[in-house]
Structures are given as C-alpha cells and as structure tokens.
Image (cartoon, rainbow, N blue to C red):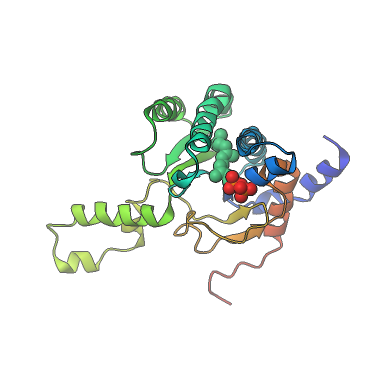
Amino acid sequence: MNTEKEQILNKIDKNNLPSHVAIIMDGNGRWAKKQNKIRTFGHKEGAENVVEIVRASSNLGIKELSLYAFSTENWKRPAKEVDTIMSLVVKFIDKYIDELNRENVYLQMLGRRDEVPDFVLDKVDYALDLTKNNNGMILNLCLNYGSRQEILDACKSLVKEYQNYSIEDIERINFNDFEKYLYSKNYTDVDLLIRPSGELRLSNFLMYQSSYAELYFSDILWPDFKKENLYEAILDFQNRNRRFGGV
Ligand code: FPP
C-alpha cells in the first residue's frame, strides 16, 4: 500500500465507523464509453471492483454492506446488458465466494426472487447456504431490488398475517413489528449511503433504511471507485454532525 492510501486509512477513527454502508454502483456505462468500449465492458470492470470494496469494508470492520447490483427498474435495459449483469453476479460468486466464506462474510440477497433467472438464483442460494452460519460482515446483494416494492411487499405480508387481528391490535403495530416484513430479518439502519458517478439520486434504494443516512456523492465512476475513495467517504462521514432530528 502506498503512503498516501495508508495516510487516509490511518485518519479513520475505528471507533466511529458507519455500521451499515450502502453503495449505488453507478457509472459503469459512462466508464466504458470513455474507453470507447460497449456498456457491458463497464459492468465487467464494475464487478471486478466489487471485491476490492467488499474486502476493504470487511477489513475495516464495517458490519453491514449493501450493494445495488440490479434494480427492479433495470429490466428496461437491453436484454444483452441484463444478461451480462446476471452472468456477472454468477461469476462473482464462482470466483469469490470461498474467499468471502473464509472471511466470515454472511451473504444475503435482497430483492424480489421472481423474475430473477433460475441459473442466478441457484448460484445465489448456494452462496447463501454456504455462508449462513457466518457472523462477520453482512453483505447484502441487492438484486431485483426496489425500495417501494420492498415496502409494498412488507405491507402485503403484514396484512395477511394480521387479517384476523382486531383493530386495536393493528393500531399497536410499531416500526419493530413492521420491519420484520422487510426483505432482511436483521437490517440495521443505513449510516452512510454512497453514490459515485455524479448522480444525485436515491433511485429507489433502501429508502426506508436510509431515513437518517448520511449521503455521500462522488464524481468518480464506479469502476474507478477504489478503497481509498471508500476511506474518504468514511472520513467525510466521521466529520458529519448527526442529530437524528434532535438539536
Ligand atoms: C449502474 O451503472 C450499474 C448497474 C445497473 C449494474 C451494477 C452491476 C455491477 C457492478 C456488476 C454486478 C454486481 C456484482 C455484485 C458482481 P450504469 O450502467 O447505469 O452506468 P451509467 O449511468 O454510466 O450508464
């Protein structure tokens, strides 16, 4: 590691880390265009970058990392691009799941399973099963994920569960009760939400969980967003004054 990177890492206060970091991995298409390559080339490079950020997060002691790999809206893209992203998820698992397992990473898939091709689900399920007893960093692979869809799905499950309950019981439903119906059983609130590539949007990502997240935007395109950029985002987070609505 060169000195500059070391210096950024040394500045991070290990006792004030964001517990849950969420990343919108944006900018693959523009990255490819800049190299006069087709969009799928950018996704391949973006997938390679995933492992660097996962390793850096786990080594640092981040407890939960959520990565937006494919949104419920991404089906609108050309079939070739969709196929490439799906295949990259499979290849990523093939190549890195043993390492992640050794690193004690606990993998979860967040998103609607229907629509996701079977060859992807089979691989994801294999990885979920392999890592199910791990208690290191939680890695949320957000695949066919949409926040509105998650909230709607939670409401539907909750209504089914409560259909024979009284109005008084329903009035007593609190956030804790509601959160049990979200895609993850062990969500923590997002502390730091990172979006590279210069776009300033949430794009339907973990909106319920990010209610009090600190937002960090960077102009760097995802394939170029390296661990030192993650460290910079964390340093920026550590300089924020979080009040959660208080004074
Ligand atoms: C957004 O960039 C990126 C995506 C929709 C796909 C992200 C997928 C990966 C990084 C690879 C697969 C993931 C894993 C976990 C292995 P964009 O295409 O919208 O970029 P643009 O805005 O520049 O066009």
Instruction: Give the x, y percent position of residue 141.
Output: 49, 39
Q: In this picture, is 78 found above or below 164?
A: above
Q: Left or right of 36: which side holds 178?
A: left
Give 77 or 66, whichever is nearer the viewer: 77
Give 188 or 95, whichever is nearer the viewer: 95
Instruction: Give the x, y percent position of residue 112.
Output: 37, 43
The quarter of the picture where the N terminus appears is top right
Give 76 or 232, whichever is nearer the viewer: 76
Q: Left or right of 6: which side holds 211?
A: left
Snapshot quadrant of residue 92: top right
Residue at 39% across / 57% down in the picture? 148
Q: In this picture, is 92 found above or below 148?
A: above
> Can the viewer see residue 65 in this picture?
no
Q: Left or right of 16: which side holds 134?
A: left
The quarter of the picture where the C terminus appears is bottom right
Residue at 31% across / 52% down in the picture? 153
Instruction: Give the x, y percent position of residue 143.
Output: 46, 41
- Quadrant containing ligand 1 reads top right
> Can the viewer see residue 126 in this picture?
yes
The number of numbered badges drawn on the structure is: 0
Q: In this picture, is 67 found above or below 165?
A: above
Q: Residue furthest right?
A: 3
Residue at 83% across / 46% down in the picture? 7
